[in-house]
Image (tube, helix red, strand yellow):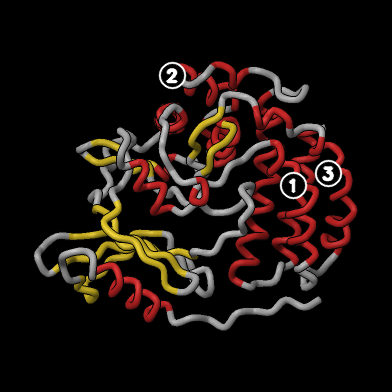
Amino acid sequence: MSTMLKAPERLDLVDEALLGTMLGAYAGTVRQDTAKVLGGVHDGAHGSVTRRYWLTDGGTVVFKRSHACRSGDGAASSADEAAVLAAIGSTDLPAARVLAAARVGGWAGMLLHDLGPADAVRPVTVDDTATLAAWVHQTEVQVPPSDLPVIDSTSLADLVTRQIPELLARHAAMAGVAAEVIRDVLPAVRRVAEVRCGSADRQPRGLCHGQLHPARVHRTAAGRAVLGWSRAYHGPVLLDLAALHHASPASGDWATVLHDYVRSGGSDAVYDNCDGLDSGRWASGWHHLRRAAVTLTDLDTVGEPLSPAVAVQLLSRLRQAQRCLT
């Protein structure tokens, strides 16, 4: 089976169409000649970008473009970020306000309230992020189910019984010894994962950010805001904390993350064992499996083949998941 690569798109034309659609609902004209790239730029088919645009009235807005496609599976799919942010806007969670949103083909665009330059007086820490995590997880938001994936024991089990194997099968272009080893290790991963998914249905559960990292916290003189909600979901908060821990492993061990989280008002049930495992091993195992699924899903979305280098990374994640969940 061969992998069909998609022809590269003219992203400047995508931006023009997105901006044209959104500016019909928002007063102001973007001065595109003064756009400033803020981050999240990926060349080629990935095409995600965040820019600040100046308006002719003297104001500014932040434009974000990303793929609108998602797998339809709550374990690895993307949330409708605009819908999540709109729902958050009715709470006291700190996040950017959506001014307008649009979709053009397989692309989603948003115009966001400009939070201004980040304040570099003190870098955001894992402790700061754990405090915000406790706030996020305790906040009730009314997001339509179709816009917010749900992670539970069924979706986690499906991750190893169907989703990852099917995605791998579609990537016949992967080469090298890693390909055969991945196929050999999958049954062993499946055996341990299938008996370690039940605790996903247990509290504490709630709104989760999905990509917790100090870099996702935007600090200004006026306060803080949590950025990047495209991987948001409703599910076990331990997976959110595992994302924070693995994104910043040098900044504190698992016990420190849990201590900061509980001290900030998070549930102390995060210390409880999960399916016979320490909560850290359980959360780390599923974190690695979910990241493997995200990598494959993203490749699928943009039509890129699985390279030997990425295959080695996937093999490493699968082996780490097996060790954690055994």
Say whether residue 77 is left or right of residue 199. Answer: left
- In x, y percent, where is residue 305? 69, 71
Query: Which SS class for mark 3?
Result: helix
> Can I make out residue 249 in this image?
no
Task: Looking at the picture, tell me which residue is in the foreground, 261 or 96.
Answer: 96
- Nearer to us: label 1 or label 3: 1
Classify residue 279 as left or right of residue 149.
right
Q: Earlier in the sequence, mark 2 or mark 1?
A: 1
Could you tell me how far apart the alpha carbons at marks 1 and 3 are, in whole angstroms? 10 Å
The answer for how far apart the CA atoms under marks 2 and 1 are is 32 Å
Residue 257, compared with residue 4, is above or below; it is above
Which residue corresponds to the image point at 80% horizontal and 36% vertical from the top-left?
Answer: 323
- The residue singled out by tag 1 in the image is 158
Which residue is more in the foreground, 215 or 212? Answer: 212
Q: CA distance from mark 3 to mark 2?
A: 35 Å
> Which mark is on residue 190?
3
Q: Residues within 10 Å of mark 2 (few under 14, many from 20)?
A: some
- Label 1 sits on a secondary structure element that is helix
